Amino acid sequence: MQTGLYDVIIIGGGPAGSSAALYTSRAVLKTLVIDKDPHAGALGMAHHIANYPGIPDSLSGMELLELMKRQAVSFGAEYVRDKVTGIDPDGAEKAVFTVSGKYYRAKTLILATGAMGKSSEIPGEKQLVGMGVSYCATCDAAFYRGKVVAVYGKNRETVEEAIVLTRFAEKVIVLCSAEKFSVSEEEVAMLHQAGNVEIRYDSKVLAVNGVKEVESLTLQGAGEPLVVDGFFIYLSGSSPVLDFIGGRLAVSQCGCLKIDSFYATSAPGVFAAGDMLCKEIKQAVIVAAEGCQAALYADRYLRGGRKPKHDYR
């Protein structure tokens, strides 16, 4: 079923998408946000957010997303719950196809589908996400001040996030999932410099235990469970959600969507923002800012198609 023509269709309703929707709707652009599931994104799964500017009290990621959505809707943005299965980014009118069979048209698109974590599938992990299981020390370390936490993985992120946790936790137990870390000796030495770190190599976590919060970890070959208050997992990283583009946009060798410095993709009138861009630092405030920029460049494109220029020489 075909719908009317929008000025902007935003695919993804996370912080990047909702921020973009706020700016396009305030610019009096007919805006539609297509979001498959607000709970599916990284922010939607967060139980406590205390580092978003202007929000002094801790709130859940879903509560923050609802505030963003409500603000965008107040200026005229529309939200629909649907999954995008394909796009046609060419021509003056772009097309968006969804699993419900609807066919949407827009003059511009902003892609903000985020990145999907590769599940480590540890028994008990999924049930305790936000209740002691975390994937972001930068986000959650302050909640573990004076407590005991475990960090699981072998990559650079494992080491860097463990170092962040040493500033807050009483003790950080790093469970390296291999015989050694996949980083330089200098980086491991920085971790050793913290006096509240214990490193266990060649570790395998068999289960995360707890009912309403993380209580302990079952380790392979260990007689007793490891008692911890928090469990930070860095096994697999994440990959951008690009399954719907169908080869219609340029992608880098590492599987990331290519954009220029104005958040424009290889197709004129199609912009992108947020975690799907494979940026190293992933924080809600950063992707919200990217959504703002993508929206402003989309607005400029619609109001004349002028290629943005830098103000400096």
Image (cartoon, rainbow, N blue to C red):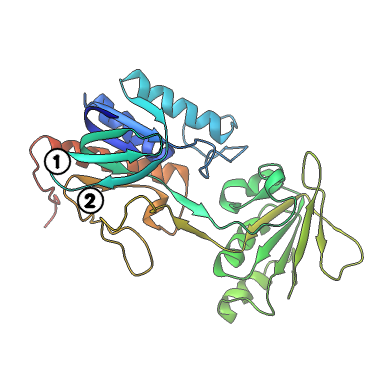
Front-lying residue, 179 or 250 = 250
Residue beneath label 1, please?
301
x and y percentages locating residue 121 in the rendered image: 67, 57
Query: From the viewer's perspective, is residue 254 above or below residue 81?
Result: below
Expressed as whole percent of the image width and height from the top left, the position of residue 236 reads: 57, 63
Q: Is residue 282 left or right of residue 294?
A: right
Viewer can see residue 289: yes
> Is residue 55 at least partly visible in the picture?
no
Left or right, 188 with respect to 208, comes to: left
Residue drawn at x 65%, y 58% is: 233
**Is residue 6 toward the left or the right of residue 221 in the image?**
left
Closest to the observer, 303 or 170: 303
Quick check: 180 left or right of 236?
A: right
Element type at mark 1: helix
User: Which residue is depicted at the point 68% across and 52% down?
Assistant: 168
Q: Is residue 122 above or below residue 5?
A: below
Could you classify mark 2 by the number of other residues whose Cα lies within 10 Å: few (under 14), some (14-19), or many (20 or more)? many
